[in-house]
Image: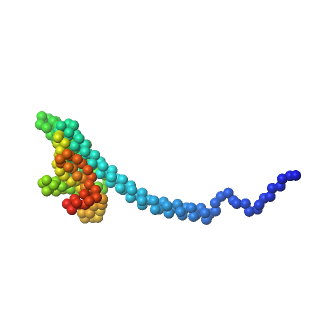
Amino acid sequence: MPSHRTHNARQAPGGFTLIELVVVVAILSLMVGTAIPLFGGALGKLRATSAIDEVLMTLRLANQKSVFQQARQEFVIDFRRDKNRYWIEFLQPGKRAKKLRWAPDQVRALKRDFEFIQVYFPDQDETNRRRQARISFFPDGTSKDCYIFLGKSVGSGGRDYDPLYVIEVRGSDGRVRLLEGEEKEEYEGYL
C-alpha cells in the first residue's frame, strides 16, 4: 500500500517575520547605546592610568640609574608652555669643553589633556609650579622628598582637576608610589 503523506496547508515558514526583525534590531540598538558610554569611560580611565604609569616608571628609572651608574640623576618637569614635558638629566662632558654639563635623556610628554599641576617639597615647605621643577636622585638610593600633582583640567578656570593624582617620592630610600584614598586626600589641600 502506497504511503500517503498528508500535507498540512499551514506549515511554519523557515524565516522571520518583519516584526520579529524590528524587535531584534531595537534590542540590539538599546544594548549598543548603553555600552558605548560605558566603554568611553573605561577608555578614558585606561588612558589616564597609562599616562600616570609612564611618569611613575620614569621616576623609578631615574632612581635606579642613579644607583647603578653611581651618579646623580635629575627628574625634570617643564611647566612652561607645554606644561606636559618631563625628562631625566645626567652629567656628561660638554661638546667642546671638559666641564660636565647636564644633558637630557629622552624628553617625554604627558598624554592627552593631562598636565603637571605642581611639585611640593615638604622639607623646604615650598611649592614649585613655574618654569621647571627638579627632583634629584642620589647614588646612595636617596632623593629629595616631594609630592607631584598631576591631573586633567575640567572647566575654564583650570583650578579643578578630574581625575587628580598625587605621586610621592620618599627621600630616605627614593621610593616612588601613587597615593590613593585617605593619603591622597591629605595632600589635596596643597593645591
Q: Position of residue 20 (x, y in %)?
A: 61, 63
Q: Position of residue 15 (x, y in %)?
A: 65, 58
- From the viewer's side, name the closer residue of 189 and 25: 189
Asked whether, in this view, residue 127 is left or right of residue 150, the answer is left
Asked whether, in this view, residue 149 is left or right of residue 100, the answer is right
Q: Position of residue 152 (x, y in %)?
A: 29, 58
Q: How is the image coloured?
A: rainbow
> Which residue is painted at 49% across and 61% down in the image?
31
The reply to whether residue 99 is visible in this rendering is: yes
> Which residue is painted at 22% across and 60% down in the image?
186
Asked whether, in this view, residue 30 is left or right of residue 183, the answer is right
Location of residue 64 by image quarter = top left
Residue 10, relative to residue 55: is it above or below? below
> Which residue is painted at 56% across and 61% down in the image?
24
Residue 156, relative to residue 1: is it above or below? below
- From the viewer's side, name the closer residue of 111 and 50: 50
Asked whether, in this view, residue 29 is left or right of residue 133, the answer is right
| Image quadrant occupied by the C terminus | bottom left
Q: Position of residue 78 (x, y in %)?
A: 21, 51
Residue 90, relative to residue 180: is it above or below? above
